[in-house]
Amino acid sequence: MRNVILIILFVAIVSGCGKKSTEPSSDIIFFDSFENFAGRPELSGWEWVWDEGTLVYDAPAGGGLWSLELHSSPYIGEPGIAIRELNPPQEDGIYRFSAWVKSDCEASIHWLIRTGNDNYQMNHATTFESGWTMISITDTLSLEGCDLFEIVLTAGCDSSVGPNYFDMVKLEKLD
Ligand SMILES: [Ca+2]
């Protein structure tokens, strides 16, 4: 619950009024594999609550060469948090948000919606697996132009655990 409060607090600070995306309805997160079209590491679009994530030469099958390494904060014992604001998808429907994750303790993915009247909806999936594992959230998305739509990655339990890794962070329209 504390993680949810932290995420909502920081999302409220960085949020703005988005517009409906005109991008294709699948794979709508640019650089979803943390590498650019030339295969070089790429972190565009992400914001950090504590320490900035780093890119490491490690990836699951199909994930290219690089992945995101995210630590809990060693100073305050809070999970590492990466946030990315997306334009709300153009089409309403059922969407899947997924990522491949490798965890030393606890790693989660979240999507968070803040509507114009400051109501929040958050969905999440969590893994404790030490090998690369795909986790996902599937739900209906129906957003207005000024709704906030954020995806969030969280890593670690406390300052005593190692890094967690994320790759192939995708949002896809299923129906
Ligand atoms: Ca990758």
Image (tube, grey):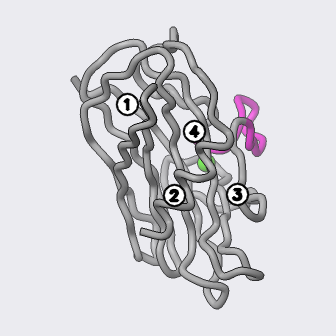
Q: Residue at x 54, y 14 (%)?
A: 19
Q: Main secondary structure of the magenta part?
A: loop
Name the residue beneath numbered marker 4: 32
Relative placement, left or right, of 81 versus 87 is: right
N-terminal label among 4 and 3: 4
Q: What amino acid is labelled 1 in the image?
A: Glu
Name the residue beneath numbered marker 2: 60
Q: Are marks 4 and 3 in contact (CB under 8 Å)?
A: no
N-terminal label among 4 and 1: 4
Viewer-side label of 1, 3: 3
N-terminal label among 2 and 1: 2
Name the residue beneath numbered marker 1: 172
Nearer to me, 115 or 152: 115
Q: What amino acid is labelled 2 in the image?
A: Pro
Ligand 1 contact, mark 2 (Cβ < 8 Å): yes
Q: Are marks 4 and 1 in contact (CB under 8 Å)?
A: no
Relative placement, left or right, of 120 versus 33 is: left
* Element under disc 4: loop
Viewer-side label of 2, 3: 3
Q: Residues within 10 Å of mark 1 (few under 14, many from 20)?
A: some
Quarter occupied by residue 108: bottom left
- Boundaries of the magenta span: 32-44
* Element under disc 1: strand
Name the residue beneath numbered marker 3: 49
